[in-house]
Image (cartoon, helix red, strand yellow):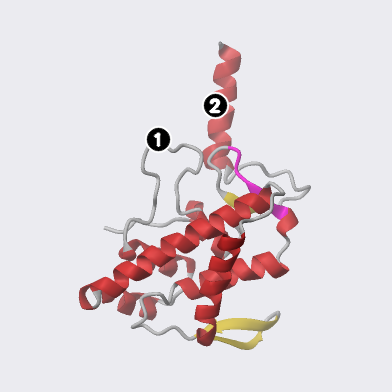
Amino acid sequence: MSKDWSDDDFVGGCLSLDFANTVDDRVDQSRDQDLLHNYADLVSWSRATGAVTDDIADRLSELPSKYPEKVTSAFRRAISLREAIYRTFDAVSEARTPDEKDIESIFSAFAAAGRRLSVVPGGDGIEAHWKLDPEDASGPLAPIAYSACKLLLCGDVKRLKQCHGCGWLFLDRSKGGRRRWCDMKTCGNRAKVTRFRQKAH
């Protein structure tokens, strides 16, 4: 069974950061924290974020039985891209220079996806439109790679932060720019409980 995704899983502020955050806790490495265990999880996540339409997601879900080797390869590329995105924006959030190999991986993924991209008039001017091939297991990576490149080149990376609790990445659009947590309901509350217990002792 694929994970049931909720709004609490999408706090990054853009698609690529939400993808990097598909590891439950980047700080605690004592257990398996990965939220993407297989290709079905990748498809369900892509559907939940709107990165792929329901129709495309339904057809992608059929690929593991049709092309198991291609699907396995596509899933490995997805995880590799996710980790390159995480390491890159982890470095940016701490004012460090990202690794050139990670940057190359991100832009290579976008270059491979470029043929699926077209631009159409939208509410804010020009919007990206994806023509994804339902027979291409790597299709969901196209909008993710585009999001990462867009954030690197045109995004407000000054707003990029990491949660003090779990290490998730997010764009801080709060008033005053003082957000510290991925979500107050999760890491924020845990921090409050920890402080309370420390004071009690």
Neighbor class of circle 2 (other Cα within 10 Å; few <14, some 14-19, many 20+) is few
Residue 175, given in percent of the width and then of the height, sits at 76, 50
Amino acid, disc 2 = Val
Label 1, on which residue?
A: 30
Considering depth in this image, is 186 or 105 the residue closer to the camera? 105
Q: Earlier in the sequence, mark 1 or mark 2?
A: 1
Q: Secondary structure beneath disc 1?
A: loop
Q: CA distance from mark 1 to mark 2?
A: 21 Å
Residue shown at the point (68%, 81%) measured from the top left: 123
Pick the quarter of the image with the N terminus. Answer: bottom left
| Looking at the image, residue 88 lies above or below residue 121 | above
Q: Is residue 60 left or right of residue 124?
A: left
Residue 5, disc: none
Label 2, on which residue?
A: 193
Residue shown at the point (30%, 74%) measured from the top left: 70
Extent of the magenta region:
159-164
Residue found at the very far right of the displayed protein = 176
